[in-house]
Image: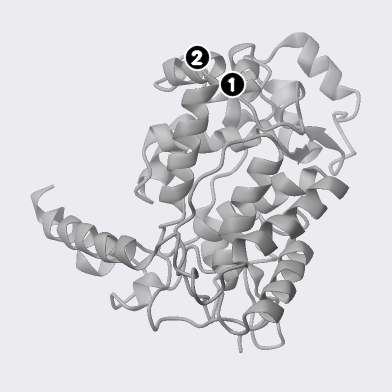
């Protein structure tokens, strides 16, 4: 442990610098109508399709969670060779980049292909923002604001989003394939993967509450309803009606069957009743370290809303590009 101490000290110092560079008022003078524009487009999108709030929230998570290193150059394991390279993956809108003849990005990574949605909504916001304040606001900040607004518009909490991120000029298919937790993950794996990003087990459990909205494909929960022992029998039977033992992999079911389009704490009540749709979700309440927290969230919506908001702010600090790093993309789908 002692040998890692210098690395953690440097990480703390760099994290402090990043926190200083991001601010909710970053665009107060350069693009004062930014948040009004984002809220307006998101309100229209969610009104047309409530699921879009969940889709944009998931897009934000999949963008932020894919970072190749924290401060590995200073003592933590990394695949990068210098501290400047260490900060080019995270909340940087890399997930928005389209593939080209010479470039393969993150959109077709296994966790994202035919799964992550909302790109067109981000495009619409970007178009409006560029008309109001050209070459000023990053796509990464637009995604962060849109995720917050999607939660709020579906009845969830709101929070001040720290802004000032810049956009990546590249993306990593390999990192997207290896960094994101999956629907079959164990509790130990979930805790470990979040811990590697500087997020606590409490942060992980709170962020998992995002599954109080949105849908999942049959292929991602079939093994749970047919094979898991800790699943409510009537719940499993209901899900099997549209997710048979074979076929129908793309058939959708709500992650929270009780209130699928309302951002509330019923996700946790489902877990207590063994009605979690994904294996990884039910792992949060299965005789392990997060049981007490899940029980608390299931009866204390205020505690969940507060912890979720705090965890979303922390998530937004995962390796952002700031200052002169990266760029402000004029089109979120391609580098300038």
Q: Residue at x 48, y 46 (%)?
A: 312
Q: Position of residue 306 (x, y in %)?
A: 46, 32
Residue 22: mark in rendering? none
- Can residue 90 be seen by looking at this rendering? yes
Residue appearing at x 66%, y 31% in the figure:
212
Residue 210 locus on image (x, y percent): 61, 37
Q: Which residue is mark 1?
A: 268
**Which residue is the extreme one toward the left?**
2
Q: Closer to the N terminus: mark 2 or mark 1? A: 1
- SS type, badge 1: helix
In the displayed structure image, the side of residue 75 where residue 108 appears, left or right: right
Locate residue 50 relative to residue 292 in the image: left or right.
right
Residue 45 horizontal side relative to residue 64, left or right = right
- Residue topped by disc 2: 295
Tag 2's secondary structure?
A: helix
Residue 169 coordinates in the image, percent (x, y): 53, 82
Q: Dot 1: within a 10 Å radius of its alpha carbon, few (fewer than 14), some, or many (20 or more) residues?
A: many
Seen at 44% across and 68% down, the residue is: 26
Residue in the foreground of this view, choosing between 316 and 231:
316
């Amino acid at each position: 442990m002692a040998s890692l101490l210098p690395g953690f000290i440097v990480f703390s110092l760099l994290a402090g610098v990043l926190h200083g560079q991001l601010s909710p008022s970053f665009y107060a003078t350069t693009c004062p109508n930014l948040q009004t524009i984002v809220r307006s487009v998101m309100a229209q999108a969610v009104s047309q399709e409530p699921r879009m709030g969940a889709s944009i929230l998931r897009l934000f998570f999949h963008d932020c969670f894919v970072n190749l290193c924290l401060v590995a150059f200073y003592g933590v394991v990394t695949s990068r060779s210098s501290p400047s390279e260490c900060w080019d993956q995270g909340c940087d809108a890399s997930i928005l980049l389209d593939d080209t003849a010479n470039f393969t990005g993150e959109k077709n990574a296994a966790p994202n292909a035919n799964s992550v949605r909302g790109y067109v909504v981000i495009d619409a916001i970007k178009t409006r923002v560029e008309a109001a304040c050209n070459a000023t606001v990053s796509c990464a900040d637009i995604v962060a604001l849109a995720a917050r607004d999607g939660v709020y518009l579906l009845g969830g909490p709101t929070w001040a989003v720290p802004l000032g991120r810049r956009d990546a000029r590249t993306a990593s298919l390999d990192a997207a394939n290896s960094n994101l937790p999956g629907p079959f993950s164990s509790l130990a794996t979930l805790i470990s993967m979040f811990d590697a990003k500087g997020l606590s087990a409490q942060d992980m459990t709170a962020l998992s509450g995002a599954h109080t909205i949105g849908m999942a494909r049959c292929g991602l929960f079939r093994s749970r309803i047919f094979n898991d022992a800790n699943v409510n029998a009537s719940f499993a039977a209901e899900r099997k009606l549209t997710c048979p033992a074979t076929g129908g992999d793309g058939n959708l079911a709500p992650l929270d069957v009780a209130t699928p389009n309302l951002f509330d704490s019923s996700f946790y009540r489902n877990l207590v009743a063994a009605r979690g749709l994904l294996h990884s979700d039910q792992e949060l309440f299965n005789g392990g370290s997060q049981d007490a927290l899940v029980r608390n969230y299931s009866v204390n919506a205020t505690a969940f809303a507060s912890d979720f908001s705090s965890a979303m702010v922390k998530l937004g600090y995962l390796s952002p590009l700031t200052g002169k790093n990266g760029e402000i993309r004029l089109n979120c789908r391609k580098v300038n």
